Each structure stands twice: as structure tokens, then as C-alpha cells.
Image (cartoon, helix red, strand yellow):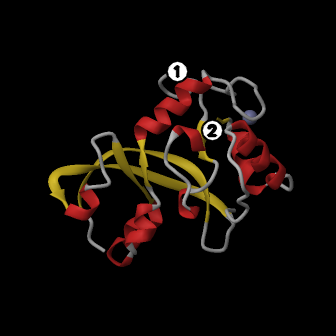
Amino acid sequence: MFLGEFRYASHFWCWGPDKNGLLRKALIFLLEPQEGAVREGVKASLDPDTALYLEQGHLQEISRVKELKVSRYIRSLSVARETLRRAGGICELCKQPAPFSDINGEPFLEVHHIIPLSEGGADDVNNTAALCPNCHRAVHYSEDAPLLREKLRLLRKISGSSTNYP
Ligand SMILES: [Zn+2]
């Protein structure tokens, strides 16, 4: 589905599952909506502080990608910034300082949605945690993932359970 014109903002590498669920390096493009060039329905869900994340593979698929699939990558940058500010450079799961600094000298932590957006989780700071890369991978892929997810739900006082995401 054509969503409109977006402008390249930046990109970064991360790990993500491929079609078979195996980890591979993924190039994530951060795109900003072009003023006045984005479809009305889409524009309604984008504020100036929101960006569209596109994985490399999806750029090739963009002509046949479904709106739902794309909307999974729309996340508020202000929520991410506030989550990182709140953490103050300390992983909210293992309580250790970020293992390294990013290229701007800021502690490197990743923003995790405790209830995934794809499962109806909110894109707000009550549903996020700043995690070190190790804990973030563990929450998704480790043997102890269900336990770690429970810890994060308790941290944010979120009831219920969610175990569907990889
Ligand atoms: Zn950690």
C-alpha cells in the first residue's frame, strides 16, 4: 500500500529475525514523513516526532507490503527518548550501566515494548523499558524469556500475559 513520500533521516544496524526466524543483521532505515506528501489516514497517526522504521527487506517489498505490516514500524521517537531519559543509562532489567556509549557518547540502551505493538500494546512510556542489548535479546530469544517478560510487566505494573512475540 502506498503510504506517501518519506524522507531518509538516518539508519542503523540491528539484529532481527529473517523469514525463518534465524537472526541476521538488519539495516533499519529511519524515515520522516514528507510534509504534505503522506496519505491522510496515515498522516493522522504521524506527528512531527514520529518516524517510520523500515527494515531493508521491506524496502524491496514496499510495493506489496500491507498497511498493518508497515504500521508496526511506526513508533514515537518522543516515547523512545523519554524511556531512555527515565532509565538514566541503567538497564531496567539487569540494573547494570549500558555496556558502551553510542556514537554521540550517550549510553547505549534499546527501547523495548513490553506488550508488543502488534499485540495491541500502547506506544507510551508505561509500556516501554530501556534494556541493554544483552537483556533485550534475552527477553526475545532466551530460555528464560517468559520469566524476564513477567519481570518487565511487574516493573511497569502491567497485568495479564503476553508470550507470543519471538
Ligand atoms: Zn540488562
Q: Residue furthest left?
A: 36
Asked whether the residues under the numbered discs 2 and 1 touch, taking CB atoms below 8 Å apart as contact, a structural biologist would say no
Q: Position of residue 144 (x, y in %)?
A: 85, 52
Between discs 2 and 1, the one toward the N terminus: 1
Q: Position of residue 22 (x, y in %)?
A: 69, 66
User: Looking at the rendering, which quadrant does residue 83 occupy?
Assistant: top right
Q: Amino acid at mark 2?
A: Ala
> Would you say the beta carbon of the disc 2 residue lies within 8 angstroms of ligand 1?
no
C-alpha span from label 2 to label 1: 20 Å
Relative to 166, does residue 31 appear above or below in the rendering?
above
Image location of residue 151, percent across then percent down: 78, 42
Residue at figure coordinates x 52%, y 20% from the top left: 105
Determine the secondary structure under disc 2.
Answer: strand
**Of labels 2 and 1, the one closer to you:** 2
Q: Quadrant of the C terminus?
A: bottom right
Name the residue beneath numbered marker 1: 105
Residue at (70% x, 23% y) in the render: 97
- The amino acid sitting under disc 1 is Gly
Residue bearing mark 2: 129
State the quadrant of the N terminus. Answer: bottom left
In the rendered view, does 95 fall on the left or right side of 113? right
> Which residue is drawn at the image coordinates 46% and 52% (left, top)?
28
Q: Is residue 3 above or below residue 31?
A: below
Give the number of callouts. Answer: 2
- Residue 128 in the image, given as x and y percentages of width and height: 59, 41
